[in-house]
Image (cartoon, helix red, strand yellow):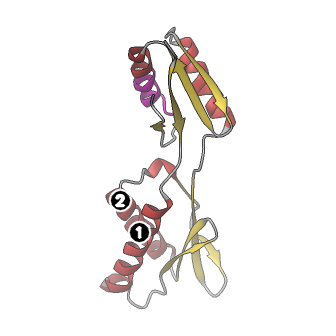
């Protein structure tokens, strides 16, 4: 009988992030407390930029964006934000980036966690993902539960289960 396996990845659905961004942009345009504050939220390359006249309004816009991400079922563990920094023209800027892939050192830590669990599965780091394989599907289920407990602050997803 062939080994069963699954992949552990840490990616976000770019379309869902885009939908959340558009919903947040629409709410910022309509809400009274954001009128005349110069608050905007837009893509800038692979990151999202929030700009406002005050740092408090920028943080409030970030909260609106986070709320929309949660409603679209995008894990906030994937979101990395900067503190409000002064930008040109008396405005403040917050940069938001999203984790794409598992960093190598965290992948090694996850693989080590699986090895130390004494489950009869093997874990290999393959680029920015982790492949876990074993003969017994019950052991793979236990490995998934173990990884969910020790997620290293990453939005782990389990794909290609076969």
Whether residue 152 can be seen here: no
Of 122 and 2, nearer the camera is: 2
Residue topped by disc 2: 72
Q: Taking 62 as reference, is 35 above or below it? A: below
SS for callout 1: helix
- Residue at 42% x, 75% y is 22
Q: Quadrant of the C terminus?
A: top left
Q: Position of residue 30 (x, y in %)?
A: 32, 85
Splitting the image into 4 quarters, where does residue 57 fall? Answer: bottom left
Q: Taking 73 as reference, is 125 above or below it? A: above
Q: Give the class, few, some or many, for how many residues have Cα within 10 Å of label 1's Cα (few <14, many ≥20).
A: some
Splitting the image into 4 quarters, where does residue 26 fall? Answer: bottom left
- Residue at 36% x, 54% y is 73
- Residue at 42% x, 28% y is 149
Whether residue 65 can be seen here: yes
Query: Which mark sits nearer the N-terminus, 2 or 1?
Result: 1
Tell me: 10 left or right of 19. right
What residue span does the magenta drawing correspond to? 143-152
Report if the CB atoms under discs 2 and 1 are less than 8 Å apart: yes
Of 31 and 106, nearer the camera is: 106
Which label was assigned to residue 19?
Answer: 1
- Residue at 67% x, 83% y is 88
Q: What type of secondary structure mainly makes up the magenta span?
A: helix
Of 53 and 117, nearer the camera is: 117
Q: Taking 6 as reference, is 40 above or below it? A: below
Tell me: 108 left or right of 12. right
């Amino acid at each position: 009988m062939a080994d069963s396996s699954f992949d552990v990845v840490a990616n976000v659905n770019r379309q869902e992030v885009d939908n959340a961004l558009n919903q947040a942009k629409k709410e910022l345009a309509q809400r009274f407390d954001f009128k005349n504050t110069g608050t905007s939220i837009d893509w800038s390359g692979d990151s999202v930029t929030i700009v406002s006249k005050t740092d408090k309004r920028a943080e409030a816009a970030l909260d609106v964006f986070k709320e929309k991400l949660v409603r679209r079922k995008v894990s906030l563990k994937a979101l990395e934000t900067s503190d409000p920094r002064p930008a040109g023209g008396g405005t403040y800027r917050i940069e938001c980036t999203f984790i794409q892939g598992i960093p190598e050192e965290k992948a090694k830590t996850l693989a080590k966690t699986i090895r130390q669990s004494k489950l009869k599965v093997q874990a290999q780091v393959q680029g920015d993902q982790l492949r876990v394989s074993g003969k017994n599907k019950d052991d793979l289920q236990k490995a998934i539960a173990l990884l969910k407990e020790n997620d290293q602050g990453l939005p782990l997803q389990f794909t290609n289960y076969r």
